[in-house]
Image (spheres, grey):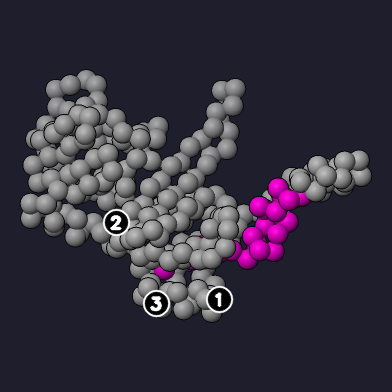
Amino acid sequence: MAAAPTALSPEATELAARHQLGALEGTFTPKRLSKPLFALYIFTIVHLLAIFVIPGLLFFWWLRRYPNFSRKQAAKRLHLFEHGMIAHPQSGDGMVAIRWDSVRLYQDITQKIINGVPGPTTHVYSAVGPGRVNATITEFYEGPGTWGPHMQGAVLRAQGPAVLESILAGQRVNFGDFSLSRTGMATTRNGHLPWSDVQEIRVGAGRVYVMRTGESGPWCSVAVSDIANLHVFLTVAENLST
């Protein structure tokens, strides 16, 4: 990864040891505002406080979500380890530790189009662990194009072989809207599709399309954000359909 490991806090060190997360592979810090935007916000605060005190204070309170205006936010970190992750939530306190071998990871990457012009891209990864443990990681942290694929790859390495083995042994594995078995794939809406009838599985425009042999349109179309462990699903499905 591009982001180099850094020293862990005592709390993070203890949490990593307790969950046996292994070696630290990368640390990501909160994304800071650009200099022009930071200057604009400062200018706005000064003028609001000079004219309208309460709106100015409310605006400053709102700005404290950014690390430029809050030491608490600036101190947050996303740590990626060999066997899992530790994340400070964007809002609130505390840290969450989740292992790759037990997580259900959902991703939602959306690019806004403004008057036909491509706008900002939002990255939202929801990591759900056993029990009620969960974390939502967004572009609040620098480098979503690095840490997002790294997390998906880590989950694939941790869970992929075991998932494929269990399916070949006769079990059905659920990935959210999809479930995979030794005989084929299924969705609640579309029913069962044998592997021999699967022509292609492709990802585009934020959706997963399954093409059925002999048909021009997709057999089904499911939002990527509704699929748990996307890379595990795609890799296992490709192995079973060939």
Tag in front: 1 or 3: 3
Question: How far across and down, in percent of the image, does residue 55 sit?
Answer: 81, 42
Any part of residue 170 in sight: yes
Question: How far across and down, in percent of the image, does residue 142 sit?
Answer: 57, 55
Provide the residue designation for mark 2: 156
Tag in front: 1 or 2: 1
Any part of residue 153 in sight: no
Name the residue located 41 percent from the left edge and 78 percent from the top edge: 17
Task: First in sequence, mark 1 or 3: give its number.
Answer: 1
Tag in front: 3 or 2: 3
Task: First in sequence, mark 1 or 2: give its number.
Answer: 1
Question: How far across and down, in percent of the image, does residue 127 sit?
Answer: 40, 54
Query: Would you say the residues marked 3 and 2 are in contact, meaning their CB atoms lie under 8 Å apart?
Result: no
Q: Horizontally, is 74 left or right of 217 in the view? A: right
Name the residue located 51 percent from the left edge and 70 percent from the top edge: 5
Residue kind at label 3, given as amino acid type: Arg
Q: CA distance from mark 3 to mark 2?
A: 23 Å
Task: First in sequence, mark 3 or 2: give its number.
Answer: 3
Magenta stretch bounds: 60-81
Name the residue located 24 percent from the left edge and 40 percent from the top edge: 178
Q: Horizontally, is 87 left or right of 22 in the view? A: right
- Secondary structure, mark 3, is helix
Provide the residue designation for mark 1: 9
- Secondary structure, mark 1, is loop
Quadrant position of the C terminus in the picture: top left
Q: Horizontally, is 77 left or right of 125 in the view? A: right
Residue kind at label 2, given as amino acid type: Leu
Q: Which mark is residue 18?
A: 3
